[in-house]
Every structure is written in C-alpha cells, then in structure tokens.
Amino acid sequence: MNQAVDKSSAGVGERQYHIGIAPGEVSTVALLPGDPFRVPLVAEFLTDVRTVAHKREHMTMTGMYKGRMITATSTGMGCPSTAIAVEELIRVGVTSFIRVGSSAGLQPGVKPGDLLVSEGALRNDGTTAAYAHHGFPAVPDLEIALELGKVARELTAGTETSVHSGINASDDAFYAETPEWIAELNRLGVLNVEMESAALYVVARLRGVRSGMICSTSSNLFDGTSLYSGVEKALKDGWMRSIEAALEVAVRLEL
C-alpha cells in the first residue's frame, strides 16, 4: 500500500535539499537578506568568513562577530522561498532569525535609507494561508523587535537617518500593487510593504523559534519617491545600518 510522504519530518538530521546545508555547519542565529548578492554585505562585518553553500537563490556564509558565530542566508524573493529557507535552516539548528531586507514606505516622512522595524505583518500572501487560519497573526518575537528598534536608534543618533516602527504588509505580487491598494494600506496606517516577513513570522511561530525584521527603505510608494530615481546610495547605507543593528541584537540577546 502506498504511503504519502510526511514533509514535516523530511530532511531532519540531513543535508538540506534546497539550501544545501547540513547540521553543524551554521550558527543558532541567521540573518536573512533576500538577495544572495547582499550576503557578502553581512560578511563585511564578520571575521573568519566562509561560504557554506549556494544553491538556487539561497547563499549561505558564516563568520564571527564580537565572539559570536553568525550565519547569513538569502531567502530569495517572496514568501514561498522564504518559508523553504526558514524550514530548512530550523532543521539544521537555527533558532533565531532576523530579516535584513528592502522595503517600500507607505506613510509620510519615510524616506529612502530610513530603517523600518517590523511589529507585525499583514498577511497578503498565499504561503501562510497553507500554514495557518487566515486570522492567525504574523508577528515577530517581541524582545527581538524591541531590541532592534533600540539598537537602530542608537546607531542612527545624530544622523539624517530616521527609524520607524510599525505594522508592515507582505504582498505576493510586486507588479499587482495598484494605486488603490497602496492607498488602502496607507489609510490603515501600514508603515511599509515587502514580500517575505509574513512567512518568516508564521513559520517561526509554528516551529517554536524566534524572528524579527529590520529593513532599509527603498522608496515611498505613497509620495512617489521611487527606487529608480537615484536613491541607491541611501538604500545601501540603510542596508549596512540594518545589518549592524541585527548583528548587535544577536550578540546582546545571545541568540
């Protein structure tokens, strides 16, 4: 008699199929940029850096920061690939995640390069619907979220970079975000929109691990400040500050 595969136990204790990592090769804490080309930006802060694996959109590097082993793994774009990366990283021993990505602002005063600390995500994606009831909240670990805000404000004190905290949206379809949808998110007070955090938060909660997110603002969709109008330097500066904030939180909270 045929028996259906139970994916809840698939790959436990083994080298992971999608990310190419085996138990013992990574830290208990992982920073999660979306783009594999931003994993080396994390590595700029680390010593004793080595590349662990690079399969598909998932590049993984490890190194040391202030005496703590740190892993950085790219998730790719969107909730489906993020959920796969998080599930497999949990299987090899990661217990805390901090997403360090890009996100578009939705409220007045949010400018390119500003830091965005997530307090929860509006689940406008399909992946988390496969995991949990539509009313199940997508929320980060409270201690991580609070510490990210605190450290980010310390790092940006005396600079022109602002730190904003609030609810973000996680969308699936980048080019389907209509002006009407953007206006509705603004009306609801949603701070920013990106494509990965809902999956990170829901999977982390269901698997009993911790997660958080701090992003650099790429653009402001409500006031028309576009990523494509010469804001790349501000965006990268924000990435570096968000990475440094995440690393400091990993050390301070002993993740």
Image (tube, grey):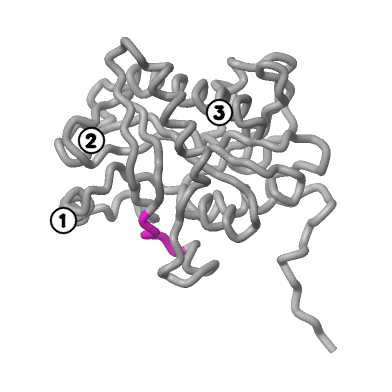
What residue did someone put label 3 on? 249
Residue drawn 18% across the image and 55% down it: 184
The amino acid on which the numbered mark 1 sits, given as a three-letter code, is: Glu
**Residue 172, how many percent across, how many down?**
39, 55
Q: Quadrant of the N terminus?
A: bottom right
What residue did someone put label 2 on? 220
Q: Please say whether residue 45 is one of the residues in the magenta stretch.
A: no
Residue drawn 57% across the image and 56% down it: 205
What residue did someone put label 1 on? 180
Stretch of the chain drawn in magenta = 122-126
The tally of labels here is 3
* Left or right of 122, for residue 222: left
Seen in the picture, residue 123 relative to 51 is either above or below; the reply is below
Q: Please say whether residue 123 is one of the residues in the magenta stretch.
A: yes
Seen in the picture, residue 97 relative to 188 is either above or below; the reply is above
Sequence-wise first label, 3 or 1: 1
Sequence-wise first label, 2 or 3: 2
The amino acid on which the numbered mark 2 sits, given as a three-letter code, is: Asn
